[in-house]
Image (tube, rainbow, N blue to C red):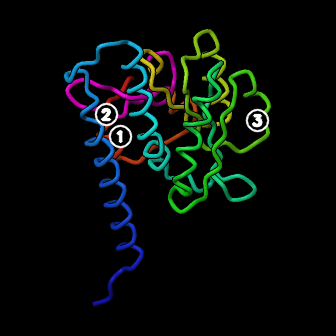
């Protein structure tokens, strides 16, 4: 009997994706509020760390990710900040150390919120908020929607405000998705990712 190599590859790929996603979620359970966070600043930092670890999973869940590489064949990712450049650069460096995502090389940059318009003519695969965008948030959301870019934020209230992806931390850690925002960005995620995520309709 002939076997379908393509089918086997898809199965292996899906298993790897599922294993990777659950590994990240399981590893972040210890950051749950039930373990106690004494300071609001610490809680924000830990949410930031958790969300950054999940950021590649948000991107990998997009079946069209390979079509979002730039002219050099790279996935161009932006770590957005308002006034904490050093923190954003550290986050970008950490993400860049992955080197590849789904077999595609990464190009990760720390970019000021005010500089987003400079990237309008570039192919961007994903954006991550490293600081609350405050009054600039609507503009960031609109930029992501206009260019079909996955925008992820670790900060409470951002998903409800229109950011496509974030995290939900209760008795467990889950990806948090704004379904209307995803539709506005014309991003369709893999069914499994949708099943494990918390949704905001």
34 versus 105 height, above or below: above
Assign a secondary structure to mark 2: strand
The crowding category of the residue bearing disc 3, from other C-alpha atoms within 10 Å (few below 14, some 14 to 19, many at least 20), is: few
- The residue lying at 49 percent from left, 52 percent from top is 63
The single residue placed furthest to the top in the displayed view is: 135
Circle 3 residue: 119
Q: Do the residues labelled 3 and 1 touch (CB within 8 Å)?
A: no
Image: magenta residue range: 160-180
Of residue 32 and residue 38, the one placed in the foreground of this image is 38
Instruction: Check the picture and name the quadrant holding the C terminus.
Output: top left
Look at the picture and state if 165 lies above or below 23. Answer: above
Instruction: Please tell me how crowded label 2 is: few (under 14), some (14-19), or many (20+) other residues with Cα within 10 Å.
Output: many
The tag earlier along the polypeptide, 1 or 2, is 2
Left or right placement of residue 24 versus residue 73 in this view: left
Of badges 3 and 1, the one in the foreground is: 3
x 33%, y 66%: residue: 11
Q: Mark 2 points at which residue?
A: 174
Q: Which residue is drawn at 29% across and 49% down?
A: 23
Q: Which residue lies furthest to the bottom in this view?
A: 1
Q: How far apart are marks 3 and 2 (CA)?
A: 30 Å
The structure residue drawn at horizontal position 44% and vertical position 28%, both measured from the top left corner, is: 48
In the rendered image, the vertical position of residue 173 relative to residue 11, given as above or below? above
Q: Name the residue under label 1.
A: 194
Bin the neighbour count of mark 1 within 10 Å (Cα to Cα): few under 14, some 14-19, many 20 and up: some
Mark 3 or mark 2, which has the lower sequence index?
3
Locate residue 30, reporting x and y percent.
24, 33
């Amino acid at each position: 009997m002939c076997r379908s190599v393509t089918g086997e590859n898809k199965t292996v790929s899906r298993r790897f994706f599922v294993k990777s996603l659950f590994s990240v979620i399981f590893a972040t359970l210890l950051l749950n509020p039930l373990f106690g966070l004494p300071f609001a600043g610490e809680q924000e930092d830990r949410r930031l760390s958790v969300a950054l670890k999940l950021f590649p999973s948000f991107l990998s869940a997009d079946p069209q990710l390979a079509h979002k590489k730039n002219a050099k064949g790279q996935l161009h990712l932006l770590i957005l900040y308002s006034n904490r450049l050093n923190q954003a650069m550290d986050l970008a460096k950490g993400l860049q150390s992955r080197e590849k995502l789904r077999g595609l090389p990464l190009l990760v940059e720390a970019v000021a919120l005010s500089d987003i318009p400079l990237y309008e003519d570039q192919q961007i695969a994903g954006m991550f908020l490293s600081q609350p965008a405050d009054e600039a948030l609507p503009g960031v959301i609109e930029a992501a929607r206009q260019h079909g870019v996955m925008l992820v934020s670790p900060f409470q209230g951002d998903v409800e405000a229109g950011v496509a992806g974030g995290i939900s931390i209760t008795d467990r850690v889950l990806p948090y998705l704004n379904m209307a925002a995803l539709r506005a960005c014309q991003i369709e995620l893999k069914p499994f990712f949708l099943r494990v995520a918390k949704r905001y309709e």
